[in-house]
Image: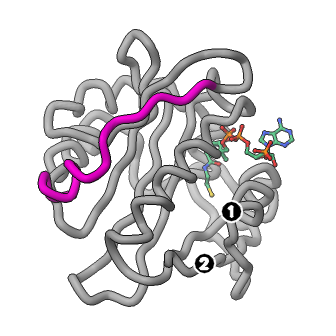
Amino acid sequence: MEPRERERFPSCEAVLKDGRSVTLRFLQGDDGPGLAAFYAGCDERETRYYYPHALDREHALANAARADSPTEVVLLLVDAAGAVGGYAWYRWREPQAPMSGFGICVAKAFQGCGAGRVLMERLLEVARTVGPPRMRLTCQHANVHAVALYQKLGFRVVRESMVRARRGWPAEPEYHMERPTR
Ligand SMILES: CC(C)(COP(=O)(O)OP(=O)(O)OC[C@H]1O[C@@H](n2cnc3c(N)ncnc32)[C@H](O)[C@@H]1OP(=O)(O)O)[C@@H](O)C(=O)NCCC(=O)NCCS
């Protein structure tokens, strides 16, 4: 996200269902080590459902190095100690692209207490004025909590397909979901 766009959306605080306070802020160039620590804490459940790339240090550093990209918005959820507890993003191919692709991953310690929802609500607020007019994602049928969250936030199923077998997980069905951003 370009720095001038970032300035339009200041960091904000949120209180999770269990009373923890967290900060939502955009990814910065020096977040590589923090993102790497977050990836290192992800286990099979996260990697079954979230697999944009290997969740390793190399990709964490590469992602942080692209923090100022004009075709990507990455929002972090950070705890009181400054540790990354989750993140959500959307990105698109070229300036006039009709559609962006969305992804989200929340650390186990933050799941089920509203972290995913607050990340998505803030990101969708940004997407009303930054990026393409539609957003899409894919989500395995088995990921029932994610499907429920996406439906509550306005995503609708547009088609279904199969995810290929990978890293110990068998092939399984997935939804392709979309929503307008404005
Ligand atoms: C899917 C994921 C992003 C959801 O984030 P989360 O912080 O766990 O979800 P939230 O606590 O914000 O809950 C959002 C909704 O999900 C559903 N949900 C979440 N946890 C639930 C649980 N334990 N039981 C029932 N429903 C649950 C509810 O519908 C909830 O709706 P509400 O906000 O009206 O209460 C998160 O669990 C995650 O990162 N999982 C691993 C990676 C992944 O699956 N990424 C998405 C790939 S498509």
Residue that label 1 marks: 153
Q: Secondary structure at mark 2?
A: strand
Quadrant holding the N terminus: bottom left
Q: Are marks 1 and 2 in contact (CB under 8 Å)?
A: yes
From what the image shows, is residue 112 above or below residue 150? above
Residues at marks 1 and 2, CA–CA distance in whole angstroms? 9 Å
**Rendered location of residue 21, percent (x, y):** 54, 18
Quadrant of residue 70 in the image?
bottom left
Question: Which span is picked out in magenta?
Answer: 1-15
Which residue is at the front of the view, 1 or 147?
Answer: 1
Q: Amino acid at mark 1?
A: Leu
**Rendered location of residue 141, percent (x, y):** 79, 64
What residue is at 42 percent from the left and 35 percent from the top? 24
From what the image shows, is residue 43 above or below residue 177? above
**Rendered location of residue 182, percent (x, y):** 50, 78
56 falls in the magenta region: no
Residue that label 2 marks: 179
What residue is at 70 percent from the left and 66 percent from the top? 171
